[in-house]
Amino acid sequence: MDQISATPGVAGQPGGPEFGRMIEALRTVQAAITGAAPPPEVSAEVGAILETVAGALEPYLVGEDEQLSGHRDDLPGRGQPLLPPLWLDERDETHLRGRVTFDRFHLGGNGAAHGGAITVLFDEMLGRLANAGRNRARTKYLQVEYHRITPLDTELRVEAKIARVEGRKRFLTCALYDGEHLTADAEGLFVELLPGQP
Ligand SMILES: CCCCC/C=C\C/C=C\C/C=C\C/C=C\CCCC(=O)SCCNC(=O)CCNC(=O)[C@H](O)C(C)(C)COP(=O)(O)OP(=O)(O)OC[C@H]1O[C@@H](n2cnc3c(N)ncnc32)[C@H](O)[C@@H]1OP(=O)(O)O
């Protein structure tokens, strides 16, 4: 996880645009499966296709350091399908600003994003900022408040800031906006790892 490549991949090489297309297709599949009520024969057919997909990748399974997913900063959400597709437009060591869109895969209920999906976004934003140009740090706590529902299929703005640093402790904040409206925000403490801490 220490190495995240911001360089767009080269066509014909592992991590090239073909990889980005595969992750994009997976996101489309996640939303389609979540949102569909298919007849049994279609579920069976799609299930068999997905088993074939997993089988096609099995010979290429690698360790964490070598996997492409999560290491591609040129792809939305680092090419990690657990993360909602997040684009970072501004970043330095004190703040991050980006755009994110939740879809049907991230549904909580009644058209609103799941609170856990929002928390994943906040942990990602704060984790990226807490680790920007600094020694490694991990989340100690993340306190989230949900102020109004976060809509699906809507481009939202997300901003993170460093509030203060006290020794190993980095206190950060993050806020998610639908237009002018704050939908959720968070405060987190990240603690710099000591030698030997994983
Ligand atoms: C996922 C990789 C993350 C690692 C980073 C790697 C690479 C970075 C490169 C690029 C970044 C790219 C992507 C990263 C994006 C997202 C990352 C998401 C981050 C995560 O998702 S990461 C997973 C969830 N996370 C954990 O899995 C942590 C499990 N946990 C531990 O590993 C330990 O818990 C640890 C090491 C955190 C601390 O342990 P510890 O024993 O060293 O430190 P301790 O607990 O003593 O606290 C020290 C000081 O904080 C004060 N303190 C404690 N609790 C407090 C509270 N509640 N309120 C106020 N103050 C508090 C104490 O009072 C003391 O203060 P003082 O020093 O002043 O006495």
Image (spheres, rainbow, N blue to C red):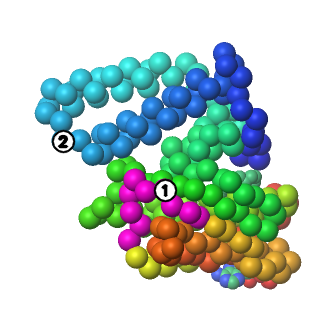
- Label 2 belongs to which residue? 37
* Residue 112 seen in the figure: yes
Figure label count: 2
Question: Residue placed farthest to the front in the image?
Answer: 180
Q: Position of residue 117 (x, y in %)?
A: 46, 60
* Few, some or many residues within 10 Å of mark 1 (<14, 14–19, 20+): some
Q: Which label lies toward us, 1 or 2?
A: 1
Residue 89 drawn above or below residue 189: above
As drawn, the label of residue 155 is: 1
Residue in view at x 76 percent, y 35 percent? 7
The answer to whether the beta carbon of the residue marked 1 is less than 8 Å from any atom of ligand 1 is no
Q: Ligand 1: which quarter? A: bottom right
- The residue lying at 57 percent from left, 56 percent from top is 99
* Vertical side of 24 occupied by 185: above or below: below
Whether residue 151 appears in magenta in the rendering, the answer is yes
Q: Residue 179's x, y, as percent? A: 50, 68
91 in relation to 164, above or below: above
Give the quadrant of the C terminus: bottom right
Q: What range of the chain is rendered magenta?
A: 149-158
Amino acid at dot 1: Glu
Q: Position of residue 107 (x, y in %)?
A: 34, 57
Residue in the foreground of this view, choosing between 124 and 28: 28
Is 140 above or below relative to 80? Answer: below
Q: CA distance from mark 1 to mark 2?
A: 26 Å
Q: Is residue 102 left or right of residue 43?
A: right
Q: Are marks 1 and 2 in contact (CB under 8 Å)?
A: no
Is ligand 1 within 8 Å of the beta carbon of the residue shown at mark 2? no
Please give left or right for residue 173 compared with residue 7 in the image: left
Decide which of tag 1 and tag 2 comes sooner along the chain.
2
Could you say whether the residue bearing mark 1 is in a helix, strand or loop? loop
Q: Nearer the viewer, residue 48 or 107?
A: 107
Three-letter code for the amino acid on which mark 2 is drawn: Ala
